[in-house]
């Protein structure tokens, strides 16, 4: 009976990460949503000309506003 106990103990030990199989589609969907969100956010930041992510003096209205306030 001793070898049978050893085999049963080895069979009880779980291998892998211990993540239930039912959660695999959820992880895939969340990974896809995260990747697409990152991609489209980066695409928006890199291609939008009107978005002020860096200092761009041509798009700044600060001088115009300051000049108007000095006139008043």
Image (cartoon, grey):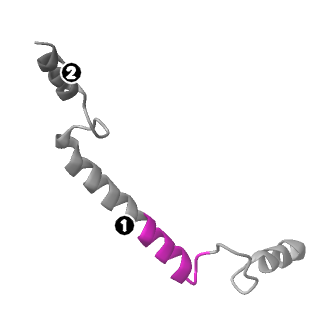
Q: Position of residue 46 (x, y in %)?
A: 55, 79
Q: Residue furthest right?
A: 70
The total of numbered circles placed on residues is 2
Closer to the camera, 23 or 53? 23
CA distance separating discs 1 and 2:
44 Å
SS category of the residue bearing label 1: helix
In terms of sequence position, does the residue under pointer 1 or pointer 2 come before the other?
A: 2
**Residue 14 image-quadrant placement:** top left
Residue named by callout 1: 36
Q: Quadrant of the C terminus?
A: bottom right
Q: Residue, x 28% and y 49% (percent of image)?
A: 27
Q: Position of residue 45 (x, y in %)?
A: 54, 74
Judge whether 8 appears above or below 27 on screen.
above
What are the residue bounds of the magenta stretch?
38-51
SS category of the residue bearing label 2: helix
Q: Nearer the viewer, mark 1 or mark 2?
A: 2
Please tell me the numbered disc located at residue 5: none
Judge whether 38 appears above or below 64 on screen.
above
Q: Quadrant of the N terminus?
A: top left
Viewed as shown, does residue 17 lie left or right of 2?
right
């Amino acid at each position: 009976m001793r070898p049978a106990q050893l085999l049963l103990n080895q069979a009880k030990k779980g291998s892998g990460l211990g993540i239930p199989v039912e959660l695999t589609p959820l992880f895939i969907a969340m990974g896809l949503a995260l990747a697409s969100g990152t991609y489209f956010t980066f695409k928006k930041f890199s291609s939008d000309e009107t978005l002020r992510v860096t200092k761009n003096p041509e798009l700044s209205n600060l001088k115009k506003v300051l000049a108007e306030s000095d006139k008043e």
